[in-house]
Amino acid sequence: MSAFTRLWRRAPLWRATVLATGVTTALSVLVPAPWLASSLPAYTGLTSRIQHALGMGGQSGTDGDDALHPQDDHRTISVPPVDAQMEGRVSFIGKDIPLPAGKWHPLLTYQDDLSHGEIMTAIYVRTNDGIVTGLLILQGTSQSLPMADTMPIQGQCTSSFAFMTRSQPMDGSHSECWLTSPIRIVNGFFLTSDPALQQLVSSPFFIPAAVERLNIQGYTLPSVLVDAAWNRIEKRAPDSRADFLSVHLLTSPAPPGSTRAPGAPENWTRTGMRDSAAVSDFVQRTNEWIQDWSPYLLKAFEGQQVTPPASAAEDPGFRG
């Protein structure tokens, strides 16, 4: 007989304590206390995933305009009908954002009131013959937030892993940059060497939900996406708060009807692209496109309603 078995039989008070600890631990995971949820956001995410696996979530089973409030933790995911269609521009954080060419379908909008209720996220998809040719990720502030909280956006502007980075001269009141970066997709996970970009595309709250909706709708992701990004941060004097708009077009280099990107996986890096003419060509065209597209995004950020010409809107992943 082991020591544990002897203790279990001879110490009823200790046995009751062990059983009570197990029960209370299980209850804390299934029904977390409000103070615990607010103190440990990651813990709330864990409990939500466990509840979903056990079929306890309160999510709607339809693709209507329902808002999801998992365990009332103030994280709101809205899932508009995916058959909705947008062209030309879309309204976001009170601004009219020009859309790249094609018909865009909303995947979800997200707001994390627990951490940063000022930040809104919206994701749209463009497809051709059931294959994703572009994902558009919009992030922006509905109200100003501390300047220090824009560090993830600033980090994207200084990536040493990007294909290309460009920025406007800073004048103390704003910063603006545009860049292109490679993203590999492996089993539905978005992988990149850039830590700041990886933080965005690996968010456990909205990217997995978007990929899940794509899978449900029968859409297929390509093996590689190239991120063409534009970021603008404006400081609001005198209280060191800021507003920002971040636009990421994840455009597909795969040929029409295919999910396989040209070149080998190692070619989709800043140095490896030199060994593949097809990869270098696509990257160069994407670099030129985002540089030409940036002025239209800036005008939209400033509150202007712009209608870019069709030729400017056609990114390299557009299939007509």
Image (cartoon, rainbow, N blue to C red):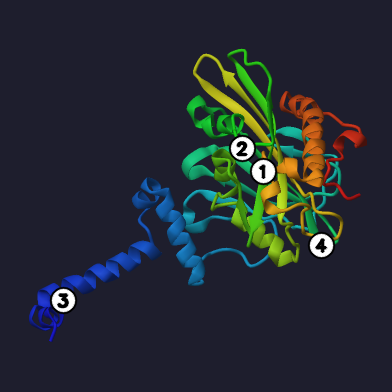
Task: Evaluate whether residue 99 shows in this view.
Answer: no
For residue 37, above or below residue 94: below
In this view, the residue farthest toward the left is 10
- Image quadrant holding the N terminus, namely bottom left
Residue 44 on image: x %, y %? 43, 55
Disc assigned to residue 269 = 1
In primary-sequence order, the first of circles 3 and 2 is: 3
Q: Which mark is residue 161?
A: 2
Q: Residue furthest front?
A: 275
Nearest the camera: 202 or 213?
Answer: 202
Q: Nearer the viewer, mark 2 or mark 4?
A: 2
Q: Position of residue 69 (x, y in %)?
A: 54, 55
The reply to whether the C-beta atoms of the residues labelled 3 and 2 are less than 8 Å apart is no
- Of pointers 2 and 4, the one earlier in the residue sequence: 4
- Residue named by callout 3: 15
Kind of residue at badge 2: Phe
The residue pinned by badge 4 equals: 130
Report the front residue among 120 and 178. Answer: 178
Circle 3 sits in a helix, a strand or a loop, which is it? helix
What's under tag 3, amino acid-wise? Arg
Q: Disc 1 vs disc 2: Cβ atoms closer than 8 Å?
A: yes
| Marking on residue 240 | none
Q: Amino acid at mark 1?
A: Thr
Query: 189 or 111, which is in the foreground?
Result: 189
